[in-house]
């Protein structure tokens, strides 16, 4: 294994140079992915490197994310800025760093890890596609009449940042954010945030990004009144000249899912940003979803008594789901057991549809189709 070191302040210029080499673009990496490559000193320990002398040859960052899930905070270890300089590829550096990152994720007691990238590459280390969203395609013909608004592009103004934070603060899903993270997210280059004002009152905002097809923009985040959001979408079509907009919402029923269903030409379930999940602590993770599981059980009319023990092969981890009048996560062993490897467990808990579409369920475990997939959501603007 190559010698792995922890980021220091002196390494930051070399890390940024590496990221520009690994992700060549017309904008420096630090301006478009500010939230992943400007760590505070307390977070240096979460950035692991392989160096050749003082030259930073490879890097992986671990980003601690607190994701809101029905009143609980899911502790996510985001993996990002994964890079090796072109002159050092093929030497096994990334293999060594991913193994070390997996160790650190367990030491830091995360519930899950999340990353976006190549399934074949990261699948070798236990990550698997998972975590569904609803993706909508909107065209101008689906939007009706809106109120009268004025529009303004956010350019880093403190007052507007406070307004954006206030509009976003009531969201029940996404990351728990502080002022510093809001500043980094809304300040990212090539992500333009527009606000709609009714008189002097801010009514809504959308953040747009373009990837590939210049005729289509992605709504990386949005918030505020439905009428204000609709007016901003019309503004994107009529003034910014986009032909289509893409928006994602949590897959669970909710206000935004209904709104975009009524105002879109097509929709489908999809993975959030090609996201992949690695389960770090099965029991702790399921405990965080206990309230959501109870909501799903009541909505489905689940009755009777059911129990199944999930065992994650090769990790020593297990958790039992007991479902009766309420759903509980316990450490008791049930008669019905499901033994799966890391990737299969993700397919069971975080599929695009019901688990039985992806995993053969044993007799007595069919009730899991009423409880899964587990739903959590990262706004595309927040993705590592």
Image: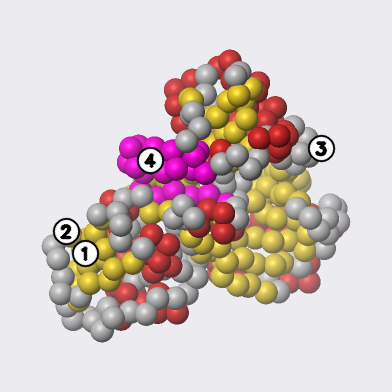
Q: Decide if residue 338 is on the left or right side of residue 331.
A: right
Q: Position of residue 337 (x, y in %)?
A: 23, 72
The stretch in magenta equals 95-116
Q: CB under 8 Å between callouts 1 and 4?
A: no
- Kind of element beneath mark 3: loop
Q: Bin the neighbour count of mark 1 within 10 Å (Cα to Cα): few under 14, some 14-19, many 20 and up.
A: many
Res 205 seen here: yes
Q: Which mark is residue 103?
A: 4
Q: Position of residue 178 (x, y in %)?
A: 48, 33
Q: Residue sitting at 33 percent across and 37 percent down?
A: 107
Q: Position of residue 91 (x, y in %)?
A: 60, 39
Is 253 above or below relative to 164?
Answer: below
Near-viewer residue (275 or 217): 275
Q: CB under 8 Å between callouts 4 and 2?
A: no
- Report how far apart the C-alphas of labels 3 and 4 lie in the structure: 35 Å
Q: CB under 8 Å between callouts 2 and 1?
A: yes
- Kind of element beneath mark 2: loop
Q: Which mark is residue 331?
A: 2
Q: Residue sitting at 65 percent across and 60 percent down?
A: 247
Q: Counting residues from the N terminus, which is met first, the one under dot 1 or under dot 4?
A: 4
What residue does disc 3 label? 26
Q: Which mark is residue 320?
A: 1
- Report how far apart the C-alphas of labels 2 and 3 lie in the structure: 52 Å
């Amino acid at each position: 294994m190559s010698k792995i070191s922890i980021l220091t302040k002196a390494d930051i210029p070399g890390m940024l140079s590496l990221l520009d080499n690994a992700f060549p673009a017309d904008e420096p990496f630090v301006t478009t992915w500010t939230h992943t490559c400007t760590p505070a000193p307390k977070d240096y320990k979460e950035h692991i490197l392989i160096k050749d002398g003082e030259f930073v040859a490879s890097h992986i960052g671990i980003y601690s994310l607190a994701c809101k899930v029905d009143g609980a905070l899911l502790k996510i270890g985001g993996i990002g800025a994964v890079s090796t300089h072109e002159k050092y590829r093929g030497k096994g550096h990334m293999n060594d760093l991913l193994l070390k990152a997996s160790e650190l994720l367990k030491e830091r007691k995360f519930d899950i890890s999340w990353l976006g990238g190549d399934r074949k590459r990261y699948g070798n280390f236990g990550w698997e596609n998972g975590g569904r969203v609803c993706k909508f395609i909107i065209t101008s013909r689906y939007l009706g009449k809106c109120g009268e608004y004025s529009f303004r592009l956010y350019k880093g103004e403190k007052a507007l940042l406070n307004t954006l934070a206030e509009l976003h603060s009531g969201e029940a899903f996404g990351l728990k954010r502080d002022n510093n993270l809001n500043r980094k997210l809304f300040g990212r280059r090539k992500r333009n945030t527009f606000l709609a004002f009714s008189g002097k009152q801010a009514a809504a905002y959308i953040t747009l990004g373009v990837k590939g097809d210049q005729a289509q923009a992605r709504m990386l985040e949005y918030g505020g009144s439905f009428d204000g959001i609709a007016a901003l979408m019309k503004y994107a079509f009529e003034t910014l000249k986009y032909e289509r907009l893409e928006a994602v919402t949590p897959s669970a029923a909710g206000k935004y899912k209904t709104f975009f269903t009524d105002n879109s030409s097509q929709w489908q379930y999809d993975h959030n940003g090609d996201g992949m999940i690695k389960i770090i602590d099965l029991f702790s993770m399921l405990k965080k979803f206990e309230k959501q599981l109870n909501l799903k059980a009541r909505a489905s009319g689940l009755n009777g008594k059911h129990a199944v023990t999930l065992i994650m092969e090769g990790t020593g981890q297990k958790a039992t789901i007991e479902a009766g009048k309420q759903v509980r996560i316990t450490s008791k062993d049930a008669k019905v057991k499901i033994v799966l490897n890391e990737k299969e467990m993700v397919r069971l808990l975080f599929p695009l549809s019901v688990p039985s579409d992806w995993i053969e369920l044993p007799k007595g475990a069919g009730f899991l189709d009423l409880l899964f997939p587990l739903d959590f959501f990262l706004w595309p603007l927040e993705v590592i």
